[in-house]
Image (cartoon, coloured by chain):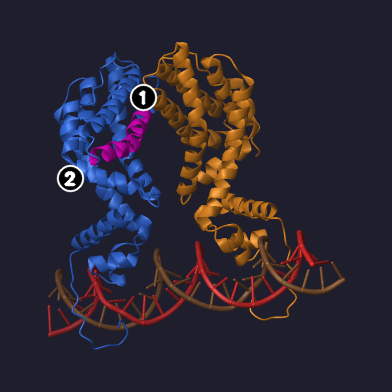
Chain colours: A blue, B orange, C red, D brown
Amino acid sequence: MAKTGTKRDSRVRMAPAVRRDLILDAAQALFMERGWDAVTIADVQEAAGISRGGFYHHFAAKEDLLSGLIARMTEQAMQTTEAAMSQNNGDALVQLNGLLDGAAQWTADNVNELRGLVQIFSRPGNEIPYRRICDADAAVVMPVLKAIIEAGIAEGTFNPVDAGLTAELMLSLSQGRREVLIEVFDLASANDLDASVDALDRRLRSEGEICDRLLGLPVGSVALSNRTEYRRMLAGLVQ
Amino acid sequence: MAKTGTKRDSRVRMAPAVRRDLILDAAQALFMERGWDAVTIADVQEAAGISRGGFYHHFAAKEDLLSGLIARMTEQAMQTTEAAMSQNNGDALVQLNGLLDGAAQWTADNVNELRGLVQIFSRPGNEIPYRRICDADAAVVMPVLKAIIEAGIAEGTFNPVDAGLTAELMLSLSQGRREVLIEVFDLASANDLDASVDALDRRLRSEGEICDRLLGLPVGSVALSNRTEYRRMLAGLVQ
DNA sequence: ATAGAAACAGACCATCAGTCTGTAAGCGGG
DNA sequence: CCCGCTTACAGACTGATGGTCTGTTTCTAT
């Protein structure tokens, strides 16, 4: 009754940021449960306990809601990146390994969440949010990575063909890890921890060696953490 | 009037394959003009001169129509790949360069079409068909590329870290070329042919050197065609 | 106290993918 | 040559869903 009613309305009024977060919470939960294109605005409304008009007061369109979700998820990547970069100030190789180690650390600390994400994103109908996340994360990490590579060139220790292209390739290397992760998680779920650790270790070792080549470094320069860490991490998966 | 009418209907009946192609033609034209999500089934119907029921007799869903389009476009990649592979039977490096040269040849012969595709796919709302094409093309080229790399390993001439990963990276290298192509085409359209050729040449030269590194080959082994060819090609752009 | 702004409610609309029932065209057998 | 079956096709209809609009309530500043 938006027209002419003396009906009691009893609405809850909240600070925009709070309400926005509430809506995003609901949307994120629904997304993780059903996938993006199966989430309707009506669903989000109901889950967030707000009306149609209320929702569209905070989000201009469904697209806008997605942007909010992506931004929220990317925030983690930003914080992790910044944290990793702020505490090491050595030469380029140390910085690079610090960055990679920071990412590995985040992964280790959030395996379960990561598995959920990987599974959701591998389901059909989620290509768009997946790409959005990849692009957003890449936009965060890319400049940092490129800066490190350029520092390494200036330093005389790195010798890549092209800083930008190399950064891009390193990014696509980590993005291509997704399919391996699916397999790794499946193996871990099947209680085949050894095979799971093997698969992950082999992949990351290869990635490291490829980075060495791309950067013109001796083999073993770029280190992607270690096996025992992986085992501990994968053993920590719930169920 | 599908119910009860003595109305003259004068419908055209065609062989399924022919009608399908006609519908795909219409859909492709509309897609190239407006982008995928701006193309409605009603549009395609009208353009193809067929009714709703007729359309859905040939395509189960809009998704199915997209699959048809992708398959059609991928066919070119298949033919080009097969053609390039069938005529050279040297060692792995010769085969690899033959494959790359075949791709370059196709590009040179279809610059205008390529530009259209690049432009359409860079517009928002076309992420899904773009990814579909990338994945489909990759699925075609990947096994061939991987086979060549493995042959090179067996031969003792290639020394990559990992055949599969290297093939993936080479693919993502060529897919990442898209953004450069946008710039290249823009420059060429602005009549700055020198800058255009420069940008393309620099990119492809870098890609080649990176491939050398990935495959453990001496610099200059992997060749991505030549400058004069690019110039001729870019000069051939209409408008 | 009161006016204005901003948060919110909910009825309404438009678009569009997909369905359903019915009809005309071809084709093979008698 | 006709008849019946299959299949290509027509077009009205539906249901779901994203987005809008007008009106209402709550808060805040003066």
User: Residue B223 magenta-drawn?
Assistant: no
Report which residue position mark 2 lands on.
Answer: A238
Image quadrant where residue B81 sits: top right
Q: Position of residue B112 (x, y in %)?
A: 62, 38
Q: Position of residue B235 (x, y in %)?
A: 64, 30
Q: Which mark is residue A94?
A: none
Q: Nearer the viewer, mark 1 or mark 2?
A: 2
Residue depicted at 28% across the width and 23% down the height: A205
Q: Amino acid at mark 1?
A: Ala
Q: Is residue A226 shown to the viewer in this render?
A: no
Q: Position of residue D7 (x, y in %)?
A: 66, 61
Report which residue position mark 1 lands on.
Answer: A163
Give the magenta range.
Answer: A168-189
Q: The residue marked by circle 1 belongs to what chain?
A: A
Which badge, 1 or 2, is on the more N-terminal residue? 1
Mark 1 falls on what kind of element? helix
- A123 on left or right of B20: left
Q: CA distance from mark 1 to mark 2?
A: 40 Å
Mark 2 falls on what kind of element? loop
Q: Is residue A186 shown to the viewer in this render?
A: yes
- Which residue occupies the foreground of this view, B69 or A160? B69
User: What secondary structure predominates along the stretch shown in magenta?
Assistant: helix
Residue depicted at 53% across the width and 40% down the height: B118
Mark 1 Cα shell of 10 Å, populated few (<14), some (14-19), many (≥20): many
- A199 on left or right of A86: right
Location of residue A105 with respect to B150 vertically, above or below:
below
Callouts 1 and 2 in the same chain: yes
Residue depicted at 55% across the width and 19% down the height: B95
